[in-house]
Image: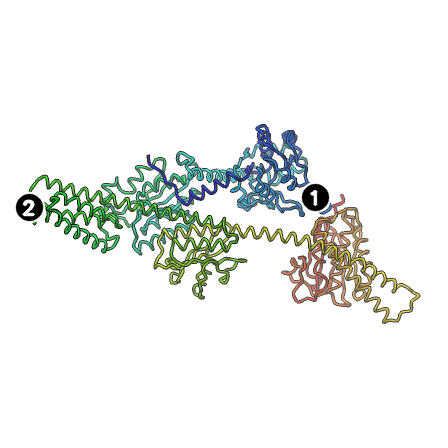
Amino acid sequence: MKIERPNPDELLASITEEEKKKDRAKLRLFFGMSAGVGKTFAMLEAAQKAKQEGTDVVVGIVETHGRKETEALIHGLEIIPRKKMEYKGTVFEELDLEAVLARKPRLVLIDELAHTNIPGARHTKRYQDVLEILDAGIDVYTTVNVQHIESRKENVEKITGVSIRETVPDSILERSDSIELIDITPIDLLKRLKAGKVYLGDIAGRALSNFFKEAPLTALREIALRLTAEHVDRDIQEMTTLGQTAGAWNLNERLMVAVSHSPYSEQLIRATRRIAYNLEAPWIAVYISPGEKLSDKDERQLKKNLDLARELSAQVITLTDLNVVSALQRIAKQKNVTQIVIGRPTARHVRDLFGGGDLLSQLVRHAGDLDVHVIRHPESLPTRNWRLSFLKFETGFRYYWYSFWIILGTTLLNLFVQKWVGYRAVGFIFLMAVLSVGFFESLGPILFTAILSGFIWNFFFIPPGGTLYVSAPEDMMMLFAYFIVTSIAGILTYRIMKQQKILREREERTQLLYEASRVGMIKDTIESYVIGVLEKLSFAIPGTFFVLPVKEGKLYPTHMMGRSVPLDMKEFSVVQWVFEHNKMAGKTTETLSGSHGLYIPLRAPQTIVGVLGFFPKAAGISTEQLDVIYTVSREIALVIEREHFGEKLRETQKIKESEKLYQGLLGSISQELKIPLVTISGSARALKEDATISQTPAHQKLVDDLLDAGERLNWIVENLLDMTRISTGVISVRKEKQDVVSLVKEVLKKYAHMTSHHQIVTRFEERISPVLTDGRLLDHAISNILLNAISYAPHHSVISVAVIRRHQLVEISVNDEGPGIQAEEQEKIFQKFYRIPGTIKVGTGLGLHISKTLVELLDGRVYVTKGEGGVGSKFVISLKMDIGK
């Protein structure tokens, strides 16, 4: 029985991943094309079944949306009470993560994986809660729709015209142990929606007019089916790699092209890319080396071919095997390939007569369920010449010279022992000499030794001697058998040694990759990991390796990891080119080949995380060595990206903790400042209004300045307090019918003493209907805009305040004659702490940001334009008049 040997790199990766899966908690996704397909219902059914089998099941959070049949399935399951959190005056119920971790059940149900948590929760997204629960060893059942998968977000937005705000990363799909597709037809889903089984009341009507239409739903269904099929296909490939399947299961189209060092391979690669593009199928480029050393010209052409395949998005596999056909069949089985693309042979070899035919004939004969595409070479002729490939001096002339001296020494030995052992036994000694030559690199020296030893044995030892004539028929048969036996025995010895060499190289490569993966478990920092891996790599491939990491989108040569190598401007420009173009360049490549080093981009799924540099000790780099470097570079890139994500997560946690501390400290300080400020302002106002105290104009001005400064400082403190409330989400909105004109007049009266240096002009339209709003918050928003105008408008200039009706809106505007705001600054002006460059610093830079936030809380809009007549700025607050209806 023939043993199929899997690719050692993939086998190691699959075994490692399989071992991780055995120990970790299980994630089961109930997946659908949209809301209403029955994901929650299916999840609860599975949970009830698990409970009947004795599993400890609890409900973390499940949204029934008022569906009675869904609520009935929760009956009998333990429910973790939801955590109540207040945000912007409204109480929300969220998953109580701490309670789930403390309860530690075997299985927890968590609905709506893409949900965004309320500010103040431990994590921003619910999927982060799920990951923490899984890390705690608790299995999770959860639900998610196709539009919430990050990689499909843009497609869904184009199809539906709806902006998708909540997404989960694709790594969640990769982390899941099983995906259960809940599928119904779009027509059935629309029937469910109309029957009130998806949404209730007016929401169902709005859904029918927007998202829920047959054409978009059909497209979403296709995306969901494809995504699920891709996940299942990966599972099957892992099972095939681990030997858990009896053979290849051709469920989806997948192409494979056989590549060699021939210049015609470029045509094969492009043809395969075209076929794969038309079929929307993945494809693989495979190079099988029979273990023979290629010339420098052939080596360069092979690298060029493989680089082209990589540029055209192929998965490139290089392998060493004496039996090319068997290797291609093995890879096709492991990768579930359905179609093989191969070029028509341009020449016939004598060895094909004894090896079962040429590569194409053997492949077609043993193809089985595979489809074989044969691509004709334009330059090939109708008739093909025969070639004696083994006559090429593949190992160099010196090995023939060594063979000659071996036979010469054997001849001298035979001349000495012939008188004791006879001329027939001499042939056995010559046979052992031929077998010893089988330890060399190619078939040429073996055949040369067999022919030369046969002629010497005939001429010097077989009677009559001194001539090539053989007198006895039995000696003639013996000499003929000698030629046959020595050739076959020598070739077999050569093949055994070559196979041992291939197995040894595979073992060394597998050991290198295994040690590289172990480094990540031992080392604490990313730099120590990279240095450890590069040291292992330099033992296998002599030379100097280093990595230039990317930080904040730039390469930093001073942060080099690995052996420190001085890079001049020329070398660093090559590194920069590799980073910018995401392509390999440098020594032994077709791009910037004059440089001293070879540079490979470290590609991670999301971005380029660095550049791997290699200064080889040898003049060139073999294809096998380059493939090892590629494999290790991919591993390094994944580890660096994972570490970067971890750093960002830790930084986010630190920022959140710092923000909480900052908000608490700011709130405490602001509150402490407010009490003495009230005292100062009150005392100043009392001094001004006390008629019993005689005041000179100078004293009166001092009191006015004190009162004005107190008001401004009080304004700053109020803004700081509001910013703290907004950041923590504790501002409550209490809407009542408000007379906007009266409210604006109160604001102007309140700050009358601060507007004494300006001319205030008001314009209030009649019949402005009351609006449903929070007067306190609107007062504060208007105040901040008015104080901003007072601060930046020159003295004695006009500040116009108006309340007008525009269609169904009420607009409150404040127009000043200050320096104005350019168009490119009009959006930025509402950002926290933003100041227009070149302007005087007044206040904290929070007032306009707070006004915008407060108005949006009131379902309004605030914006800024050029002032009337093109002078100054005009801030407008727009509120709906029909809010109170």
In what quadrant of the picture does the N terminus appear? Answer: top left
Q: Give the number of the mark in front: 2 or 1.
A: 2
Residue 464: give its label.
Answer: 2
Q: Which residue is mark 1?
A: 85
Under mark 1, the amino acid is Met
Point out residue 478 in the picture as x, y percentages from the top left corner.
13, 41
Point out residue 816 in the picture as x, y percentages from the top left corner.
73, 63
SS class of the residue under badge 2? loop
Quadrant in which residue 158 is drawn: top right
Under mark 2, the amino acid is Pro
- Residue at the (23%, 56%) spot, across then down: 398
Within 10 Å of disc 2 (Cα), the crowding (few <14, some 14-19, many 20+) is some
In what quadrant of the picture does the C terminus appear? Answer: top right
Does 200 appear above or below 541? above
Asked if residue 471 can be seen in this view, the reply is yes
Which mark sits nearer the N-terminus, 2 or 1?
Answer: 1
**Viewer-nearest residue: 368 or 525:** 525
